[in-house]
Image (spheres, rainbow, N blue to C red):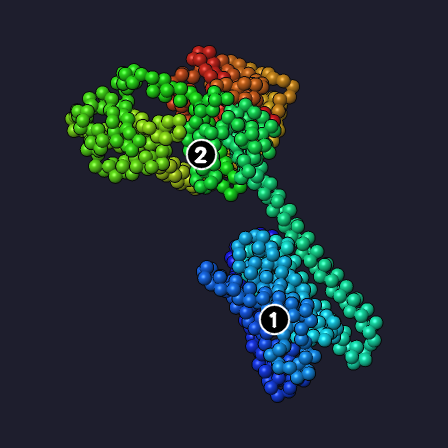
Amino acid sequence: MESVPGDRRHATARVALIPPAGAFLAAAIAVAGVARGWNAATFGGAAGVREALMVPATAAGLLLAAGALLLVQQSRAPAARQLGRILAGLTTLIGLLASGLYIVGWGGIADVAAGSSRWAQRPGPTTALGFMFVGTSLLAASSRRNDFQRLAGACAAATLVIALTGLVGHAYGASVLYGLNRWGGTAISTVIALSALAVGVLFTHPRQGVAAVATSDGAGGHLMRRLMPAALVAPLLLGWLALTAQERGLFDVAFGAALLVVSLIVLLAALIVRQATVLHAIDAERERLLARERQASEQVSRILESITDAFFAVDREWRFTYVNREAERLLQRPRDELLGRLLWDEFAAAIGTAFEREYVRAMAEQKTARFEEYFAPLDAWFEVRAFPNVEGLSVYFTNVTARRVAEERLRESEERYRLLADMIPQHIWTTNPDGYHTYFSRRWYEFTGSTPGETQGDGWLDLLHPDDRERTIAEWEKSLRTGERYSVEYRFRNTAGEYRWFWGQALPQRNEDGEIVRWFGTLTDISERRRLGEERERLLHAEREARAEADRRREELERVTESRTRLMRGFSHDLKNPLGAADGHAQLLEDGIIGDLSERQRDSVGRIRRSIHTSLRLINDLLELARAEAGQIETECVATDVTQAAREVADDFRAQAAAAGLAISVNGPESLQAETDPTRLRQILANLVSNAVKYAPNGEATLTADMKRNGDSNRPGSWVVVSVSDNGPGIPEDKRDMIFHEFTRLDPEAQAGAGVGLAISRRIAQLMGGDLTVESEVGRGSTFTLWLPPA
């Protein structure tokens, strides 16, 4: 599970309260024991002394140990620690003296019973042994060394074993466990005090030993915090309950022992199952986190493999942990031969060079190292950046041999360099490592009109535009401080007093130890580039305004189109009704319903009806055009046989074409499929054939269906085309685009049509994903081509 640093700090703070709590508890028990012992000895004689088992020496040892625990845990002052050691030593001394007296066989409670003074009492053997261990543990705990810390933990654990043995003896009524013999025993208050002191020592340093485990967020801390209370309390509680039940005669000793063992087994099994469940959840979470870590590691590896810099990483033992592909190439070693190996073993030639010095310094000081160095075995110069981290060192490097060779050939002839500097269009300048300008090329003096002595040092700042001064100084000081590339745009004053924009750049030159020996810089006149950039921004702004104006006009056109569409709908509705009524009355006249008509009258009525029908067709065409302009024409494109559609349209017009003396033919494959609306396809073809009948009488018209694999320059890819060709008068070149505009007719005097058929046909073709085009030659006829996407 993921750790929460705030919770860990709170747990550590709570654990830090354990040592003082243990010390105060032990001290309180000692004071109470002394008071009780004094009263018992004063008013109860020898019997009272026997009853009050905490003798003054025991209380004194507990108080000394409590004081030592407080000083060792709370204070960092040397004097306080020294005092704590003295108190811990006295505690150990009491234990040693008491144990020594028992070893030589001096005195005991029997002597007191015979009439000796109560001050002749001393701690029991178990208590003396506890003082020896707790005093030693406190002495060891006062040191920060790991081996002394381990000794402190071992002695505290031994004290805890002695104390818990006595505590279990009292709980189970087994006097042998708390040392009851002819010398006396250890009172329950004493074993509690020793337990408190031992626990306090174990938690003296919250980030080490048992305390570190208890406060950790791992499985160990989890188990310890949950199992330890049960391990300490459950046996005592269950034993006391079993002993009480036996004393009351509820069951015998054998049954009580069996019941106690079974209870402990059940409790232990329950705790094991519970903790196994928790650990299983922890393992599952750990696997999830490991999977995420692997995914992140793979992503980092992909990034490191894709960068142009060579990269390798070593751990704190200088063993290779990662080598990317570019590093393999530059080092001329496969990564399999390097991973897990020592850097200094594999590249021993780097020892004693800047590579070793800078890497070791970066690792020791935890500071980034940047340097250039020559590596003889590879005969190459490398620019290196080394970044320390908690796991080791990450190193990025590139081969800069070409640049170094160029620079060195330039460290060969200063005069050649100056000649070159005066020839190039940029202004060249150099400075000392501290930024003091020592050289400007001839072009600088020609531009500024200054003399060599005027702009050396900081004199060049006088020619800088006032608005650029603060920014320029800040960037230059940053580069001088960090050694990073210097790059800034600023303005300098020329001999005419005008300011021009320049791009200033500078790079440091370093010696073999990586120290900067000088800076080389250039000034490039970018005034024209800046002007072009500003002009570009102006043009972009104008373009954005033009686009906005176009959008506004488009929206206005859409509103006008919609308005015209609504007007056309209303007009056609209002106009078609009276025309329909007039046609009905004319039909009545023509049919003789209201009386017989003469031939001249019948001819006049026929002309009236034809004019009405022409007007209705015109109205329908205008409505169709309005719908096309508003994008309201609905099409349903499906796979359609265009060859069959061409044949059907040709058959529909054969009678009309024959009357006009026009021959119609159809060419094409047996079947050719296109993705189109069959109804709209026939509408367009009918319009084209109708125009051929009108404008090419006594001629011929051909409908041709074909597949074009490459289309034309405007329509790449595959297309299904249906063309209608005639040998009529043709269309002049300057009018070929006009014929697709609404209300446009080549012959304004012609009475047939309103000039909207082709406009409607092209819009419908475009709605279906195609187009309608024309090719024509005056006197030789025209060919209209309908382009459709294939099925």
Q: Is residue 776 visible?
A: yes
| Residue at the top extreme of this rendering | 780
Q: CA distance from mark 1 to mark 2?
A: 57 Å
Residue 563 location (% of width, % of height): 40, 40
Relative to 65, residue 45 above or below: below
Residue 400: numbered disc = none
At 34% from the left edge and 17% from the top edge, which residue is drawn?
A: 412
At 45% from the left edge and 33% from the top edge, which residue is drawn?
A: 357
Q: Quadrant of residue 32?
A: bottom right
Residue 358: numbered disc = 2
Front in this rendered view, residue 316 or 104 = 104
In this picture, residue 491 sits left or right of residue 354: left
Of badges 1 and 2, the one in the foreground is: 1
Relative to 164, residue 519 above or below: above
Q: Is residue 613 visible?
A: no
Relative to 85, residue 676 above or below: above
* Tag 1: amino acid: Ala
Q: Which residue carries the number 1 mark?
A: 193
Relative to 622, residue 424 above or below: above
Dividing the image into 4 quarters, which one contains the C terminus? top right
At 65% from the left edge and 58% from the top edge, which residue is drawn?
A: 223
Front in this rendered view, residue 71 or 443 = 71
| Residue at the bottom extreme of this rendering | 43
How many C-alpha atoms fall within 10 Å of the one at disc 1: few (<14), some, or many (≥20)?
many
At 64% from the left edge and 46% from the top edge, which residue is drawn?
A: 287
Residue 200 location (% of width, % of height): 57, 64
Residue 164 location (% of width, % of height): 68, 67
| Residue at the left extreme of this rendering | 496
Give the structural element (helix, strand or loop) at label 2. Answer: helix
Give the structural element (helix, strand or loop) at label 1. Answer: helix
Residue 233 location (% of width, % of height): 68, 68
* Tag 2: amino acid: Glu
